[in-house]
Image (tube, rainbow, N blue to C red):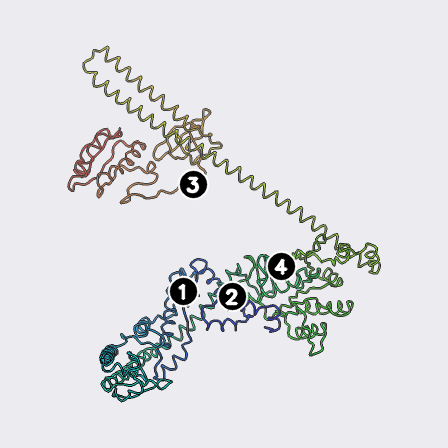
Amino acid sequence: MNPRSLRVLELPKIIAMLAELVSCSLTRQRVLDLEPSGNMEEVRERLRETDEASALIMRHSSPPFGPVHDLRPHAKISAIGSFLSPGQLMEVSDSLRTARNVRQFILKNAGEGSEMPILRGLAEVLVPVKDLEDTINNAILGENLVSDNASHALKKIRREIENKHQAIRNKLDSIIRDTSNQKYLQDALVTIRQDRFVVPVKSEYKHMIKGLVHDQSGSGSTLYIEPLAIVELNNGLKELRLEEQEEIVRVLTEITAEVAESADALLSNQETLIQLDMILAKGKLAHKMKASSPELNREGKIRLKNGRHPLIDPKAVVPSNFWIGDTFKTLLITGPNTGGKTVTLKTVGLLTLMAQCGLHIPADHGSNIAVFDQVFADIGDEQSIEQSLSTFSSHMTNIVDILNHVDANSLVLFDELGAGTDPTEGAALAKAILTKLFDWKVTTVATTHYSELKEFALVTPGVENASVEFDVETLSPTYRLLIGVPGKSNAFEISRKLGLSKEIVESAKTWIETNAIAFEDVLAKIENNRKTSEAERDEAIRMRVDAEKLRKSLEEKDEKIAEQRAKLIREAKEEARKLLKEAKEEADALARELREISGGLSKDHLRRVEELRRKLKSNMDELQTPLLEDLYEVEPPKDLRLGDLVQLVHLNQKGNVVTLPDDKGELMVQVGIMKISVNLSNLKKIEEKPAQAKRQGKGGRGFENKTVNAKTEIDLRGLNVEEAMAELDKYLDDASLANLKSVRIIHGIGTGALKAGLKPYFKNHPHVKTARDGVYGEGGLGVTVLELK
């Protein structure tokens, strides 16, 4: 990519922001070296990395990245047989711990392999070397400190050193406490000089304490003497310290040899962690910018939905909707100074470069970015005093360089093309340059003030006008980009608003060609019409949104009313069923009581009892039918056809229409194996197809629609008494509805507990008339045959 273009489009600032988000210093340099790629597949892969990192961070936060050190020097030292210092071994341990934690986090949270394949693949490449990590952690306590636990020999030597220390201190303490020696000592204390224990002796008494002089005070009044009594002890201590250093070197050499064995894994982990750190930094930047992944193409098409310049304060930036490459390859943006033309150019260029670096762009989902081989930009004042170049010369030098290197798959951005010289000549040069780039099929965006270029865009197919909106009333830009609308200079209106007299403004107009004034007037009318249309459109949208809200509100109210009505009906049904059940039970009990007391009555009394019993039963039947019909208020279905699926609301069963209703609304409905005569007012049409029967319960017993497929037997083996009763309740209801006369209950022989527990149940069940054991050929004692009412 052209280095100057990268600089003027401010990509290095975005790269610096990315570098601030990495976790280790090694990754920072890798990020600073990042450049846009012109390879479609490479860009696509880079964006996939960012997609996965963004998703991982959004769901589970960022992985626990610890220190990642440069282990290449450590690998070289271990390879030549030398040993690593404790600090270097700690760096190896830190890197291993980071690799292990990051691997564990990603494999746990990256979903299935197909969901985040890049992150999961990199995590799987990381090699945890837990044994080496534990060895280092057990042996090293700090930058220059080896643990006593590094080896048994080291622990023994350090114990002997401690004992020797104690022996020396005891001896010195006895010398200091001896009253005959105290007058010779400068202070009653023990100190160390040249790694030897000594006592401070007054210089005039140096012959009174026999020993070796190691040092003296600055004034010369004190000599530091090692008493002869501890010389041998100090010598022994020094020998132990030499042994300690030898053992430490041996331990470090041994651990370094383990590092050498794992050197390949360590360097591989280091490279993988750098890659992961960089990918995760891209995901963090995407969240920071509230950015999204753009769609890619190679056709030079750019479409930004609410694109935002990432270096402008998010609270102040005005999003732009920008597109190019579909019906036009060249876009001319006009408008007043400080109106946002340059920001639009930089936004288009910078977001294109960010995408080609594999970064998400601050724009809404559905934005589209083309992958270009080169991006060229001539933006800003590159005037050079040393080269004595004017602004025009500087811009033209850069434009010449662009024209020498551009190709069809390039993006070219010009700011104020042709400015800085005579307007007539500048406009002609700009038109010639744009024509040449258009002929080469180069995607080009340019800003300009020249009316000639506005006219050029109006009459040239494939070239389009655009403008940045300016509010003349407030004398301020709105920063909105309007594609398809040429901009108006607004110089006269702005001057008038600022107080320039009307006479001068009108005089100025006389110096402009009539055609130019007419053209500006046309632009003004277009702008006014556009604003009017937008206002009307916004009002229409507002009214449509209000109408939609009102419609939704009414629908919600209707749904609530329907739900409340259905709830009330359900509650009424349940209450009615309960009352009918209680009334029927009372009637049955009364009938049984009448039969029991009829034995001692006369014939007249018996006849009277029987009449009362029949009348009671008749009244109960008459009560049940209208009450149920009142409960199931439904609108009779219209246009019934043979085979239609309907619901018998008074029976709460489904069936198919067998005959069409007669003039009284009576028809036949097939419910399972039965054909039932029903009135049209008790039917509800079901639009959806009947669901297929589903198995439920244990051992495949029972179906969702048992009335349709009622069987003549049920197998209860393996159930306890309570489970068997629950199954039987459903089964006997279905069998009774299916009008079965007798059924077989298979309970098996076993211990006999299930059969014994069910006997009282059979005796008291309202659907059971009689119960008997099965005979030969029916299952014998393992079966009970029920005759149903």
Of the 4 image quadrants, the one containing the N terminus is: bottom right
Residue 729 picture location, percent across and down = 27, 35
Q: Is residue 677 above or below residue 443?
A: above
Residue 280 picture location, percent across and down = 46, 65
Q: Nearer the viewer, mark 4 or mark 3?
A: 4
Are the two marked residues, 2 and 4, in contact with CB atoms closer than 8 angstroms?
A: no
> Which of the 4 image quarters holds residue 201?
bottom left
From mark 2 to mark 1, how far is it between C-alphas? Answer: 27 Å
Seen from the viewer's position, the closer of residues 10 and 776 is: 10
What is the secondary structure assignment of the residue under circle 1? Answer: loop
Three-letter code, disc 3? Lys
Quick one: label 3 or label 2, which is nearer the N terminus?
2
Three-letter code, disc 4? Phe
From mark 3 to mark 2, how far is it between C-alphas? Answer: 47 Å
Seen from the viewer's position, the closer of residues 422 and 202 is: 202
From mark 1 to mark 4, how far is it between C-alphas? Answer: 39 Å
For mark 1, what is the residue?
64
Quick one: label 1 or label 3, which is nearer the N terminus?
1
Seen in the image, is 318 located left or right of residue 387?
Answer: left
Residue 689, disc: 3
For mark 2, what is the residue?
44
From mark 2 to mark 4, how far is it between C-alphas? Answer: 22 Å
What is the secondary structure assignment of the residue under circle 2? Answer: helix
